[in-house]
Amino acid sequence: MRKHRYALGATFAALAIVLLAACQGNTGGSQSGGATSNLKIGLVTDVGTLDDHNFNQFSWEGAKAGAQAIGAAAPQSVVTTQSADYAKNINSFVSKNYNIIVTVGFALGSDTTKAAKANPNIKFIGVDQGICVDAQGNPDSTFACKGDAATLLPNYQGLVFKEQQPGYLAGVVAALISKSGHIAAIGGTATVPAVPNYMIGYLNGAKSVKADIKVELKYISAAPDAKAFNDPPGGKQAADGLLNANPDIDVLFQVAGKTGNGVLQSACEHNIHAIGVDVDQFVSTPDTAKCTVVSAEKKLKKAVSDAIQRVKDKKDKGGTITLDITTDSVGLSPFHDSASMITPDIQAKIDAAIKGLKDGSIKACVETPFGSCDNKNGQPPA
Amino acid sequence: MNLRRARDAAIIPGLAIVLALVFGSLIVIFSSPLIFGLDLTLPLVAYKALVEGSFGSFGAVISTIVNAAPLILAGLAVGVAFKAGLFNIGAQGQFLTGGLAAAAVGAWLAHAPGPVAIPLALVAAILVGSVYGAIPGFLKAYTGAHEVVTTIMLNYIALYIVAYVVTGPLRAVGATFARTPDVGNASLPILVGGNGHLGVLFAFVAIPLAWWLLYRSTIGFEIRTVGAGPDAARYAGMRPRLLIVVTMAFCGGLAGLAGAGEILGLTGFMPAGYSTNVGFDGITVALLGQAHPIGIMFAGILLGAMRAGAPLMQIEAGVPAQMVDVLQGAILFFLTAEILVRYLFRIRAKSAKVAELQTVASSYGGQATPTQ
């Protein structure tokens, strides 16, 4: 029994140390000198890690860049480990009186909407989130989106991107570097608008510089599931099938998230050119960098940083903000090792396409009122 | 249960927690140079934030309880099965299918009055969870298929059932990503704070219920007897096979109820990418709680507190949320390495007595399958 008492004592001693630590004054927390803004910036990631070479990482870099630009303290992050925790993670920043909360990914849209409604004095920035609210400013369970998010939730900027524009530019590049006149794109699923947006833009871009080019558009899954976006071996299999059936295809564009990394692998193994998506995949997926010519990018870092600066300048407006090429929020990544393939003639055509998209003389696709590509009016399949 | 027995039961888990905290401190100290230079006080900052985020304010306490509720239910789903000598690794699958059933019925009755919609959605979740738990119970009892293997497999099946149903038949029309429609009126009312929903009470009702069932009812006596020795139980006129199926169904129902609480109380719908670890964490909770309902309650609150405090730990100390997983893993390690803990703290082993958890180990020996 004495032994037990000794052990119990040890337990309580250790617990006491923990509690003492809990009662100590605040330490830690990083403060940068010379700050000109006292806005506290927090970021909640989607499920995954902060260095995912994808949405989380580039949004985080945007938060850091934005904080630096406005002279605020370095931002803090909460990494989500399970989707059930979104609301809890957002609220932990709310409870610590953060002024700007960035949430990453469409999956956090519903919880960000609720938090924005409950905390009108906190600014929310939702990356890849089209805001859909009812007349009261709650997440719309009918998805009619009748509520005007800009007036109901003026503190919530939902950032979405015109994927068709970088898609269009990718198509221009693909058509110009193709020797066979036969190119392809593989998408995760047609049921997520971003994917057909990229693909239709790609088709139109390719046709704009080579009217007779053959473009294969292939979707892997009928639903936005793991097969569509999180299955590299499945992506490789699909690409292998397409490339084996059409050996003359010499440029392949992937629009399928992680599934698409398998598509890139397949392109490398078939010794053809690949085009990455969303982020600069030459950098983010080094395994396939050698055949990745360029990527059709959403410039997440710039988009988040800009949104933070708008808050600082008090120029922020709520609602869904569609970012496009006029602010360079979408576009092509650098060509890196493939720069030698881009002759002055090709570069001139790319520049002309960028200019046209910017001044509106070129449309990447026929758009619906919501800014997506209309894939019914004679546009290719969904 | 007298005090001495409670203390004897709590001593190993308590020490495992202490050792895990020490181990966690070392991890934090030695990984700190990777972020901002060696910082010996960082563990204190981290644990302080963890405590502040879980008990530091009214909202934090609510968050702890809300996080603890599904862990307690899942812990009971694993713990009660332990008593019958079954290792229910399938709480995760039972949780998911139960949650899916709640999401489906909730969406269907979204516009029905709450007093109708809520009970029906809950009953559906319990029923589906029970059936999903009864399957491995049946396979164990009548074919001898080991429940560890079958429940792990059923977890994956549940994952893909959810993916199929949410992206297919139950997909909300018009949503930009795959999810079920809103549960509307079937959502559980918020009783306290920002998210203290009704479902939290289920966990705290289930604790005395499980205790009464195990220690004060005939069936509980039979369950424990089957756990201690199925052959002896059969000799005494009990029906081990039926009891195994019934126990697993009961456990599956508890896990299914946990799923319903999360869907109807917190998210309000089920997304295709719904990810959670509640079912697996339930195993830690059950082991830490020594498979006793009261122990499971404390273990669930502890792990719930760690989950509730994790975001603040990242914000205040810059320590990743995965640290909580490290702590949980370390707790589990020190619990199962009981001999090491006894050696470190010079605690003699208790006098020979049938420990309930031993029945789990015995189920690997092959004799636990009832023979006719």
Image (cartoon, coloured by chain):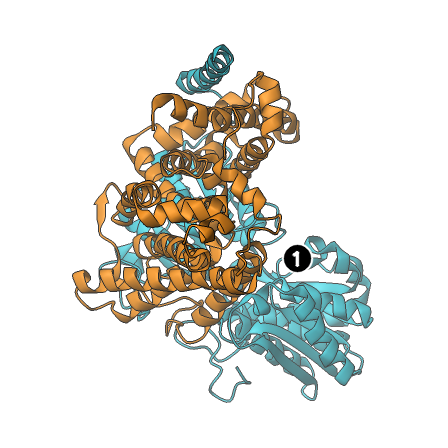
The answer to whether residue A330 is above or below residue B355 is: below
In depth, the one of A194 and B127 nearer the eye is: B127
In depth, the one of B40 and B90 nearer the eye is: B90
The answer to whether residue B339 is above or below residue B346 is: below
Percent across and percent down for residue B163 are: 49, 67
In depth, the one of A165 and A260 nearer the eye is: A260
Tell me, yes or no, if residue A104 can be seen here. Answer: no
Q: Which chain carries label 1?
A: A
| Element under disc 1 | loop
Percent across and percent down for residue B205 are: 27, 44
Q: Please, what is the three-letter code of the amino acid marked with disc 1? A: Asp
State the image quarter where residue B256 is shown.
bottom left
Percent across and percent down for residue B66 are: 33, 43
Callout count: 1
In depth, the one of B86 and A45 nearer the eye is: B86
The answer to whether residue A368 is above or below residue B77 is: below
State the image quarter where residue A41 is shown.
top left
Quarter of the picture holding the N terminus of chain B: top left
Tell me, yes or no, if residue B190 can be seen here. Answer: yes
User: Can you identify the residue that label 1 sits on?
Assistant: A280
Task: Tell me the shade of chain B.
Answer: orange
Left or right of A260 in this view: B114: left
Q: Residue at x 42, y 57 (%)?
A: B239
* Chain identifier of the cyan chain: A
Percent across and percent down for residue A91 are: 36, 42
